[in-house]
Amino acid sequence: MAPTFGRGAMTNAWTDIKNTDLVIVMGGNAAEAHPCGFKWVTEAKARRGAKLIVVDPRFTRTASVSDYYAPIRPGTDIAFLMGVIRYCIANDKVQWDYVKNYTSAALLVRDGFGWSEGLFNGYDPDKRAYDMTEWDYQIGEDGFALTDPSLKDPRCVWNLLKAHVETYTPEMVERICGTPKDRYLKICEMIAECSAPNKVMTSLYALGWTQHSKGAQNIRGMAMLQLILGNIGMPGGGVNALRGHSNIQGLTDIGLLSSSIPGYLNMPTDKEVDFTTFMSTKLNPAIRPGQTSYWQNYRKFMVSFQKAMWGDHATAENDWAYDYLPKLDVPYYDILRFFDMMSKGQVNLYFCQGFNPLLSFPNRAKLTEALSKLKLLVVMDPLQTETAAFWQNHGIYNDVNSAAIQTEVLELPTTCFGEDEGATVNSGRWLQWHWPGATPPGQARADTWILSNIFLRVKALYEKEGGPFPDPILNLSWDYKDPYEPSSAELAREMNGRALADLYDPTDASKLLVKAGAQLPNFGVMRDDGSTMSGCWIYAGSWTEDGNMMARRDNEDPGDVGTFLKWTFAWPANRRILYNRASADLQGKAWDPTRKLIEWDGAKWSGFDVPDIAPTADPATVMPFIMTNEGVGKLFSRKGLKDGPFPTHMEPFESPIANVLNPALRGNPAARVFPDDLAQMAAVGDSAFPFVATSYRLTEHFHFWTKHNKINAALQPEFFVEISEQLAAERGIKQGGRVRVWSKRGQVWAVALVTKRIKPLICDGKTVHVVGIPLHWGFIGATRKGFGPNSLTPFVGDANIDTPEFKAFLVNIEPSAGEAVS
């Protein structure tokens, strides 16, 4: 979403879903995986008569309460979405005033950009990468991008998009996706109705879109569609990422990726030798007149972060301690790269904190090999995990030679979230403070206690023994009442940030805004001169001089729009709907008066949400997408994604059919693939692995946690795979019978669930069977021992962030010895 809107977060809030007219669930199963949040879908149905569309390979529990369902072959969502865009354009179902003013439709693209046979210009097959030079706008002498407001120029984004989607006819979509044409067209019709200003659609997706080798492009396809319909910034609209854990959003916010610094700042690379060089690519000037391009404040956020990290040791004279930061020698150390290095013996020590990679990462055989080459594995977790026990032999469930594994394993028991105090950040960006509900058992200690003790001991060693460059450790700010166990409140205040000197109004030197030592009220007062500090700039405003905003519990909701501005705190700046300026026209009046969110009163923006724009920004001049250089939503993402500025159909790396756009293409041409892993992938249409498999989750279990709970274990006690009646008949498999499922990387045994929920699809003239594989079992816990889909999945990920491709891979299946169960 960031390459389209400027931020990568869920655009709206859970509570806003009640305002929609149409919900489409693709790439997720909200009723089953997010049952509490799904109540807002049922609220929309009861409150507004909203309709629910589900597109999924399986007839899920979400589909069971939908108004319309259509099947789709795993890994073909882009073709489906590009076809919907084509339908809307061909049938004039476009919110034209929105598209012409709030998107990049009118901007002119350089002449060298093009697309043919599934590839964009500039592709180098040896590097598996594109030269993106021509993926940009034409720039005028004034430094701004050229435009054609009439949308007649063949090089304008709109006409390039029209040409790009033309291949995705209903017949082509049916050919690729296996979705029956009549069902597909009915869904197109329902979606297209939401191009009217008084009709709104919302999209709900989860790991069913992200866990593909082109996952980012799946999401981008929906983001573009929602721009064309005029549904971004609208109450009841948006593109909503349903996170798989109560704090995954928070984990991302504060630096989940090795290339990220808290607040979505970038970790420097080894080519950025000093702070000036680092900042030279982050100036982010506006490329259209009068636009905000808020990332122009990058330096303020970065300097404030450095001050939070190293305090008085970060000065203008030493480039704000820029040399203290690690420098990446590769784009990032994602889990695939890290475990590949581990498998080659290039990693000695692995700290595994709150994770179970032996069941979570792809190609379990490779993971076991990698862990076996470590010198030391440290596991921090409240529960026993398969990762900590990877060296134990559990027969077919973990068939290893324990005596040959020399890895030392240390288990450090940690507290569970129900035993901690602090904030979790939900899918809608709400930082909700919670308090301990129980006392930690036994020797369990908080993660902060463990990490603080390790840090202080490492620091003591540096103080005693020295080292090549101990400064980042010795000078790290650690100003906590108890340095061995910082409190959640201290850490929260640090992330919010405070003034290190008196802050005066830049436009009025006599006006004091914030006193030295006071908590920052928002990120708007941050400075790049070292006078402010903040551990995570987007959290500024969460703990102010008025106290802990995250602990607020006032459910007042003026306007009954579901914003609840006095309930906890949402980043950024307590805004509940991102880009909400786009809910109003060029005069600042709501597109739909019955869904008023914010409006222009002639002097300022006000309403039922915090405006996602400068309060006095002229509605006719300053456009809604303040985080983009253009000021508008990007239908053409320029160089924002490695695999193209428009989404294009790409097959999974393991596919039953060839790419109909270019049979020579395999998978995502821009995805990184390690040579050994490519050799372990089934060929396109491989007769030895004729069936498509996909992973999924169940309501009765939460990831790998609840298999330790006897109640959950009783509800779903045993590992199973789900297949159609047709596939069962073809393979002689009985309901409840034992089956063996295998891929080119491994094999599993399971109970067969023969069901009507999965049906064969016809794709490019070929019958395609789908095997559904849930993921909640292992060899530790209260459930019966079992497997997960990662024993079978390929070791490859998305081209942009390398999320593994768990949702589409090839397998075979046969009956196995064992009694049938009911």
Image (cartoon, rainbow, N blue to C red):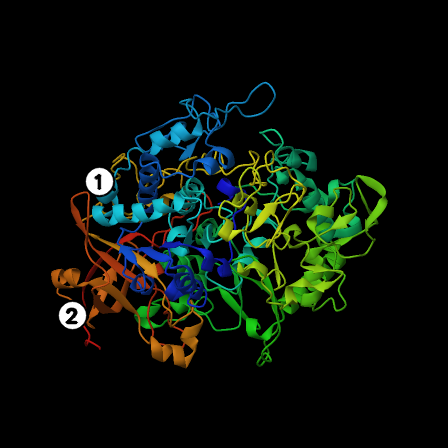
Would you place residue 785 above or below residue 502 in this image? Answer: below
**Spot occupied by residue 694 in the image (x, y as percentages of width and height):** 31, 57
Residue at which label 1 appears: 171
Q: Dot 1, crowdedness within 10 Å: few (<14), some or many (≥20)?
A: some
Left or right of residue 296, residue 115 in this image: left
**Spot occupied by residue 652 in the image (x, y as percentages of width and height):** 31, 46
Would you place residue 578 above or below residue 100 in this image? Answer: below
* Viewer-nearest of discs 1 and 2: 1
Left or right of residue 480, residue 211 in this image: left
Sequence order check, earlier mark of 1 and 2: 1
Element under label 1?
helix
**Spot occupied by residue 767 in the image (x, y as percentages of width and height):** 16, 50
Residue at which label 2 appears: 734
Q: Decide if residue 159 is in sight here.
A: yes
Q: Amino acid at mark 1?
A: Glu
Left or right of residue 588, residue 215 in this image: left
Would you place residue 8 above or below residue 89 in this image? Answer: below
